[in-house]
Amino acid sequence: MNTFKPVVALTLGDAAGIGPELIARLLSQPGVNENANIVLLGDPWLWEQGQATAGLSVTTQPTESLAAVRTRAEQSQPAFLAVDTIRPDQVLPSQAQAACGNAVLKVLNLCMDGAQRGEVDAICFAPLNKQAMKLGDLKHEDELHHFAEYLGVTGYFCEFNTLGDLWTARVSSHIPLKDAASFLTQERIVAATRLIYQSLQASGNANPKVAVAAFNPHGGDGGVCGREEIDIIEPAVRELRASGLPVDGPFPADTIFLKAQDGQYQAIVTMYHDQGQIAIKLMGFSKGVTVQGGLPIPITTPAHGTAYDIAGQGLANVNATLNAFQIAQRMGAARLAAAA
Protein backbone atom coordinates (compact mmCIF):
# COMPACT_ATOMS: atom_id res chain seq x y z
CA MET A 1 0.00 0.00 0.00
CA ASN A 2 1.28 3.45 -0.93
CA THR A 3 -0.66 6.06 1.02
CA PHE A 4 1.49 8.81 -0.51
CA LYS A 5 0.08 8.44 -4.02
CA PRO A 6 -2.42 11.25 -4.61
CA VAL A 7 -6.07 10.28 -4.75
CA VAL A 8 -7.31 11.45 -8.15
CA ALA A 9 -11.08 11.46 -8.67
CA LEU A 10 -12.34 10.86 -12.22
CA THR A 11 -15.82 11.51 -13.59
CA LEU A 12 -17.59 10.21 -16.71
CA GLY A 13 -18.75 13.61 -17.92
CA ASP A 14 -21.91 14.28 -19.93
CA ALA A 15 -23.80 11.01 -20.47
CA ALA A 16 -24.75 12.00 -24.03
CA GLY A 17 -21.17 12.75 -25.08
CA ILE A 18 -17.85 10.97 -25.46
CA GLY A 19 -16.82 11.19 -21.79
CA PRO A 20 -17.61 7.61 -20.72
CA GLU A 21 -15.69 6.26 -23.71
CA LEU A 22 -12.73 8.52 -22.95
CA ILE A 23 -12.50 7.35 -19.34
CA ALA A 24 -12.53 3.71 -20.49
CA ARG A 25 -9.68 4.48 -22.88
CA LEU A 26 -7.79 6.43 -20.20
CA LEU A 27 -7.99 3.63 -17.62
CA SER A 28 -6.76 1.15 -20.22
CA GLN A 29 -3.51 3.06 -20.74
CA PRO A 30 -0.37 1.24 -19.52
CA GLY A 31 0.92 2.53 -16.18
CA VAL A 32 -1.98 4.89 -15.56
CA ASN A 33 -2.30 3.67 -11.95
CA GLU A 34 1.43 3.79 -11.22
CA ASN A 35 1.59 7.26 -9.68
CA ALA A 36 -2.01 7.85 -8.67
CA ASN A 37 -4.62 6.22 -6.47
CA ILE A 38 -7.59 6.56 -8.83
CA VAL A 39 -11.25 6.59 -7.91
CA LEU A 40 -13.92 6.77 -10.60
CA LEU A 41 -17.34 8.13 -9.62
CA GLY A 42 -20.32 7.43 -11.84
CA ASP A 43 -23.48 5.54 -12.69
CA PRO A 44 -22.68 1.84 -13.18
CA TRP A 45 -24.77 1.53 -16.36
CA LEU A 46 -23.01 4.55 -17.90
CA TRP A 47 -19.58 3.16 -17.03
CA GLU A 48 -20.53 -0.16 -18.68
CA GLN A 49 -21.74 1.74 -21.74
CA GLY A 50 -18.48 3.68 -21.97
CA GLN A 51 -16.46 0.48 -21.93
CA ALA A 52 -18.69 -1.08 -24.57
CA THR A 53 -18.35 1.94 -26.83
CA ALA A 54 -14.57 1.83 -26.50
CA GLY A 55 -14.51 -1.93 -27.01
CA LEU A 56 -12.64 -2.35 -23.72
CA SER A 57 -13.10 -3.99 -20.36
CA VAL A 58 -11.56 -2.24 -17.34
CA THR A 59 -11.25 -3.99 -13.99
CA THR A 60 -12.10 -1.76 -11.04
CA GLN A 61 -12.46 -2.29 -7.31
CA PRO A 62 -15.78 -1.26 -5.77
CA THR A 63 -15.58 1.15 -2.86
CA GLU A 64 -18.31 2.26 -0.49
CA SER A 65 -16.95 5.77 0.04
CA LEU A 66 -14.26 8.22 -0.96
CA ALA A 67 -12.90 8.00 2.59
CA ALA A 68 -11.93 4.35 2.03
CA VAL A 69 -9.90 4.97 -1.13
CA ARG A 70 -6.69 6.40 0.33
CA THR A 71 -6.02 3.46 2.67
CA ARG A 72 -7.14 0.59 0.46
CA ALA A 73 -4.58 -2.21 0.38
CA GLU A 74 -4.58 -2.74 -3.40
CA GLN A 75 -4.10 0.37 -5.52
CA SER A 76 -2.99 -1.17 -8.81
CA GLN A 77 -6.56 -0.95 -10.13
CA PRO A 78 -8.92 2.03 -10.06
CA ALA A 79 -11.54 2.17 -7.33
CA PHE A 80 -15.14 2.63 -8.46
CA LEU A 81 -17.70 4.51 -6.38
CA ALA A 82 -21.14 3.82 -7.79
CA VAL A 83 -23.56 6.74 -7.71
CA ASP A 84 -27.07 7.07 -9.12
CA THR A 85 -27.55 10.36 -10.92
CA ILE A 86 -29.32 9.56 -14.20
CA ARG A 87 -31.29 6.73 -15.83
CA PRO A 88 -30.67 5.40 -19.35
CA ASP A 89 -34.17 6.46 -20.43
CA GLN A 90 -33.33 10.08 -19.52
CA VAL A 91 -30.50 10.29 -22.07
CA LEU A 92 -30.99 11.22 -25.71
CA PRO A 93 -27.62 10.53 -27.39
CA SER A 94 -25.73 13.50 -28.77
CA GLN A 95 -28.03 16.18 -27.35
CA ALA A 96 -27.69 18.78 -24.60
CA GLN A 97 -30.22 17.87 -21.92
CA ALA A 98 -31.09 19.06 -18.43
CA ALA A 99 -30.87 15.56 -16.94
CA CYS A 100 -27.31 15.15 -18.22
CA GLY A 101 -26.24 18.55 -16.94
CA ASN A 102 -27.77 17.94 -13.55
CA ALA A 103 -26.05 14.55 -13.29
CA VAL A 104 -22.67 16.12 -14.10
CA LEU A 105 -23.16 18.69 -11.34
CA LYS A 106 -24.06 16.05 -8.76
CA VAL A 107 -20.92 14.00 -9.42
CA LEU A 108 -18.62 17.02 -9.47
CA ASN A 109 -20.10 18.20 -6.18
CA LEU A 110 -19.43 14.77 -4.65
CA CYS A 111 -15.80 15.06 -5.76
CA MET A 112 -15.47 18.53 -4.25
CA ASP A 113 -17.09 17.35 -1.03
CA GLY A 114 -14.40 14.66 -0.86
CA ALA A 115 -11.70 17.23 -1.50
CA GLN A 116 -12.97 19.43 1.32
CA ARG A 117 -12.87 16.46 3.68
CA GLY A 118 -9.27 15.68 2.66
CA GLU A 119 -10.21 12.45 0.85
CA VAL A 120 -9.37 13.64 -2.69
CA ASP A 121 -6.17 15.39 -3.83
CA ALA A 122 -7.12 16.22 -7.43
CA ILE A 123 -10.09 15.96 -9.79
CA CYS A 124 -10.07 15.20 -13.52
CA PHE A 125 -13.48 15.39 -15.19
CA ALA A 126 -14.52 14.13 -18.60
CA PRO A 127 -16.07 16.67 -20.98
CA LEU A 128 -19.26 18.44 -19.98
CA ASN A 129 -21.61 20.68 -21.93
CA LYS A 130 -22.32 24.16 -20.59
CA GLN A 131 -25.75 24.37 -22.21
CA ALA A 132 -26.77 21.06 -20.63
CA MET A 133 -25.44 22.18 -17.26
CA LYS A 134 -27.35 25.46 -17.39
CA LEU A 135 -30.49 23.54 -18.31
CA GLY A 136 -29.69 21.27 -15.38
CA ASP A 137 -29.40 23.94 -12.66
CA LEU A 138 -25.95 25.51 -13.15
CA LYS A 139 -26.37 29.04 -11.76
CA HIS A 140 -23.10 30.46 -13.08
CA GLU A 141 -21.59 31.41 -16.42
CA ASP A 142 -19.40 28.29 -16.39
CA GLU A 143 -18.25 25.39 -14.24
CA LEU A 144 -15.20 27.28 -12.92
CA HIS A 145 -17.40 29.87 -11.20
CA HIS A 146 -19.48 27.03 -9.74
CA PHE A 147 -16.33 25.36 -8.41
CA ALA A 148 -15.10 28.63 -6.91
CA GLU A 149 -18.35 29.34 -5.08
CA TYR A 150 -18.74 25.74 -3.91
CA LEU A 151 -15.21 25.69 -2.52
CA GLY A 152 -15.46 29.13 -0.93
CA VAL A 153 -12.82 30.83 -3.08
CA THR A 154 -12.55 34.57 -2.47
CA GLY A 155 -9.32 35.34 -4.35
CA TYR A 156 -8.58 35.54 -8.07
CA PHE A 157 -9.28 32.47 -10.20
CA CYS A 158 -9.22 31.76 -13.94
CA GLU A 159 -9.00 28.96 -16.47
CA PHE A 160 -5.64 27.88 -17.83
CA ASN A 161 -5.34 26.15 -21.17
CA THR A 162 -2.28 24.02 -21.65
CA LEU A 163 -0.55 22.31 -24.54
CA GLY A 164 2.45 20.29 -23.45
CA ASP A 165 4.86 22.66 -21.72
CA LEU A 166 2.93 25.79 -22.75
CA TRP A 167 0.21 27.18 -20.47
CA THR A 168 -2.09 30.14 -21.11
CA ALA A 169 -4.21 32.24 -18.76
CA ARG A 170 -6.78 34.86 -19.64
CA VAL A 171 -7.86 38.04 -17.91
CA SER A 172 -11.48 37.64 -19.02
CA SER A 173 -13.20 34.46 -20.10
CA HIS A 174 -16.82 33.54 -20.87
CA ILE A 175 -18.20 37.00 -21.49
CA PRO A 176 -19.34 38.89 -24.61
CA LEU A 177 -16.36 40.20 -26.55
CA LYS A 178 -17.79 43.73 -26.38
CA ASP A 179 -17.24 43.63 -22.60
CA ALA A 180 -13.63 42.39 -22.68
CA ALA A 181 -12.06 45.87 -22.41
CA SER A 182 -13.96 46.60 -19.22
CA PHE A 183 -12.32 43.59 -17.55
CA LEU A 184 -8.79 44.87 -18.23
CA THR A 185 -7.29 46.18 -15.02
CA GLN A 186 -3.75 46.23 -13.72
CA GLU A 187 -4.86 44.22 -10.70
CA ARG A 188 -6.44 41.43 -12.79
CA ILE A 189 -3.41 41.15 -15.07
CA VAL A 190 -1.06 40.94 -12.09
CA ALA A 191 -3.27 38.35 -10.40
CA ALA A 192 -3.59 36.20 -13.53
CA THR A 193 0.17 36.28 -14.09
CA ARG A 194 1.06 35.40 -10.51
CA LEU A 195 -1.49 32.59 -10.52
CA ILE A 196 -0.24 30.92 -13.70
CA TYR A 197 3.37 31.25 -12.55
CA GLN A 198 2.60 29.58 -9.22
CA SER A 199 0.45 26.91 -10.86
CA LEU A 200 3.18 25.99 -13.31
CA GLN A 201 5.55 25.61 -10.40
CA ALA A 202 3.03 23.32 -8.68
CA SER A 203 2.89 21.19 -11.83
CA GLY A 204 6.66 20.68 -11.85
CA ASN A 205 8.15 23.67 -13.75
CA ALA A 206 10.46 25.33 -11.22
CA ASN A 207 11.04 28.65 -13.02
CA PRO A 208 8.68 29.32 -15.93
CA LYS A 209 9.04 32.45 -18.06
CA VAL A 210 5.81 34.34 -18.70
CA ALA A 211 4.82 36.52 -21.65
CA VAL A 212 1.93 38.98 -21.46
CA ALA A 213 -0.18 39.68 -24.55
CA ALA A 214 -1.27 43.09 -25.78
CA PHE A 215 -4.95 43.85 -26.23
CA ASN A 216 -5.06 45.98 -29.36
CA PRO A 217 -3.82 45.33 -32.92
CA HIS A 218 -0.05 45.80 -33.19
CA GLY A 219 0.13 46.26 -29.43
CA GLY A 220 -1.69 49.58 -29.73
CA ASP A 221 0.89 51.17 -32.08
CA GLY A 222 1.93 53.66 -29.42
CA GLY A 223 -1.64 54.63 -28.67
CA VAL A 224 -2.85 54.96 -32.26
CA CYS A 225 -4.85 51.71 -32.01
CA GLY A 226 -5.76 52.02 -28.34
CA ARG A 227 -4.20 52.96 -25.01
CA GLU A 228 -4.79 49.80 -22.94
CA GLU A 229 -1.16 48.78 -23.39
CA ILE A 230 0.16 52.14 -22.20
CA ASP A 231 -2.30 52.75 -19.39
CA ILE A 232 -2.90 49.25 -18.01
CA ILE A 233 -0.82 46.37 -19.39
CA GLU A 234 2.67 47.92 -19.34
CA PRO A 235 2.27 49.12 -15.72
CA ALA A 236 1.16 45.60 -14.74
CA VAL A 237 4.25 44.09 -16.36
CA ARG A 238 6.50 46.61 -14.60
CA GLU A 239 4.88 45.75 -11.26
CA LEU A 240 5.42 42.03 -11.82
CA ARG A 241 9.03 42.46 -12.86
CA ALA A 242 9.71 44.67 -9.86
CA SER A 243 8.48 41.84 -7.63
CA GLY A 244 10.99 39.45 -9.19
CA LEU A 245 8.84 37.47 -11.60
CA PRO A 246 10.33 36.62 -15.04
CA VAL A 247 7.66 38.42 -17.07
CA ASP A 248 7.92 40.19 -20.44
CA GLY A 249 5.48 42.10 -22.64
CA PRO A 250 3.08 43.23 -23.75
CA PHE A 251 3.61 41.49 -27.11
CA PRO A 252 1.19 41.78 -30.05
CA ALA A 253 -1.19 38.83 -29.96
CA ASP A 254 -0.44 37.81 -33.55
CA THR A 255 3.23 37.09 -32.76
CA ILE A 256 3.32 36.10 -29.09
CA PHE A 257 2.68 32.40 -29.75
CA LEU A 258 5.59 32.27 -32.20
CA LYS A 259 7.89 33.20 -29.32
CA ALA A 260 6.37 30.47 -27.19
CA GLN A 261 6.75 27.92 -29.98
CA ASP A 262 10.44 28.79 -30.10
CA GLY A 263 10.68 27.93 -26.40
CA GLN A 264 11.22 31.48 -25.12
CA TYR A 265 8.19 31.31 -22.79
CA GLN A 266 6.31 28.60 -20.95
CA ALA A 267 3.24 30.72 -20.15
CA ILE A 268 1.22 33.39 -21.92
CA VAL A 269 -1.28 35.68 -20.23
CA THR A 270 -3.93 36.65 -22.77
CA MET A 271 -6.48 39.41 -22.40
CA TYR A 272 -9.66 37.58 -23.49
CA HIS A 273 -10.92 34.10 -24.34
CA ASP A 274 -10.31 33.63 -28.06
CA GLN A 275 -7.01 35.49 -28.06
CA GLY A 276 -5.38 32.41 -26.60
CA GLN A 277 -7.88 29.66 -27.39
CA ILE A 278 -7.64 29.97 -31.18
CA ALA A 279 -3.86 29.61 -31.12
CA ILE A 280 -3.80 26.75 -28.61
CA LYS A 281 -6.45 24.76 -30.46
CA LEU A 282 -4.73 25.26 -33.81
CA MET A 283 -1.46 24.09 -32.28
CA GLY A 284 -2.93 20.91 -30.82
CA PHE A 285 -6.70 20.48 -30.52
CA SER A 286 -6.50 16.80 -29.60
CA LYS A 287 -3.91 17.37 -26.87
CA GLY A 288 -4.99 20.49 -24.98
CA VAL A 289 -6.02 20.60 -21.33
CA THR A 290 -8.02 23.06 -19.24
CA VAL A 291 -6.78 23.60 -15.67
CA GLN A 292 -9.09 25.39 -13.24
CA GLY A 293 -6.68 27.89 -11.68
CA GLY A 294 -6.93 29.49 -8.25
CA LEU A 295 -8.92 26.72 -6.53
CA PRO A 296 -7.79 24.95 -3.35
CA ILE A 297 -7.66 21.62 -5.21
CA PRO A 298 -6.34 20.87 -8.72
CA ILE A 299 -9.17 20.33 -11.21
CA THR A 300 -8.43 19.49 -14.85
CA THR A 301 -10.31 18.42 -17.98
CA PRO A 302 -9.55 17.96 -21.68
CA ALA A 303 -9.91 21.28 -23.47
CA HIS A 304 -12.24 19.88 -26.13
CA GLY A 305 -15.95 19.40 -25.56
CA THR A 306 -18.45 16.56 -25.48
CA ALA A 307 -18.15 15.90 -29.25
CA TYR A 308 -21.83 14.99 -29.59
CA ASP A 309 -21.27 14.39 -33.32
CA ILE A 310 -19.16 11.28 -32.68
CA ALA A 311 -20.65 10.11 -29.36
CA GLY A 312 -21.28 6.39 -29.19
CA GLN A 313 -19.21 5.64 -32.31
CA GLY A 314 -15.97 4.52 -30.65
CA LEU A 315 -13.97 7.31 -32.33
CA ALA A 316 -12.93 9.44 -29.33
CA ASN A 317 -9.25 10.44 -29.07
CA VAL A 318 -7.92 9.95 -25.53
CA ASN A 319 -4.79 12.12 -25.80
CA ALA A 320 -6.18 15.27 -24.18
CA THR A 321 -7.84 13.26 -21.41
CA LEU A 322 -4.58 11.48 -20.67
CA ASN A 323 -2.76 14.82 -20.54
CA ALA A 324 -5.43 16.24 -18.22
CA PHE A 325 -5.11 13.23 -15.92
CA GLN A 326 -1.31 13.49 -15.81
CA ILE A 327 -1.45 17.18 -14.86
CA ALA A 328 -4.01 16.40 -12.14
CA GLN A 329 -1.77 13.61 -10.85
CA ARG A 330 1.33 15.84 -10.70
CA MET A 331 -0.48 18.74 -9.06
CA GLY A 332 -2.24 16.40 -6.66
CA ALA A 333 1.10 14.86 -5.68
CA ALA A 334 2.56 18.32 -5.02
CA ARG A 335 -0.48 19.26 -2.93
CA LEU A 336 -0.22 16.02 -0.94
CA ALA A 337 3.51 16.50 -0.35
CA ALA A 338 2.99 20.10 0.82
CA ALA A 339 0.42 18.92 3.36
CA ALA A 340 2.62 16.10 4.71
Image (spheres, rainbow, N blue to C red):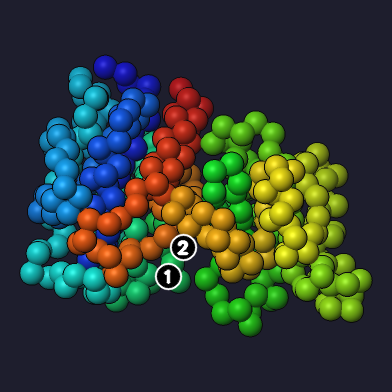
- Near mark 2 (Cα within 10 A), the count class, few <14, some 14-19 or many ≥20, is some
User: Residue 253 in the image: x percent, y percent?
Assistant: 73, 64
| Extreme residue in the top direction | 1
**Contact between labelled residues 2 and 1, with CB atoms less than 8 Å apart:** yes
Q: Quickly name the residue at label 2.
A: 145
Q: Position of residue 61 (x, y in %)?
A: 14, 32
Q: Which mark is residue 71?
A: none
What x and y, as percent, mark residue 158? 56, 57
Position of residue 296 relative to residue 258, above or below, is above
Give the distance between the C-alpha atoms of the residues marked 1 and 2, in whole angstroms. Answer: 6 Å
Between residue 316 and residue 336, name the one nearer to us. 316
Q: The residue tagged with tag 2: helix, strand or loop? A: helix
Residue 146 visible here: no
Which amino acid type is shown beneath numbered disc 2? His
* Nearer to the camera, 285 or 135: 285
Q: Which mark is residue 140?
A: 1
Vertical placement of 118 versus 89: above or below?
A: above
Furthest residue toward bottom: 178
Residue occupying image coordinates x 77% and y 73%: 216
- Front in this rendered view, residue 142 or 220: 220
Whole-percent x and y of residue 171? 64, 63
Locate residue 266: give its quadrant.
Answer: top right
Question: Taking 298 as reference, is 44 left or right?
Answer: left
321 vs 38, left or right, is right
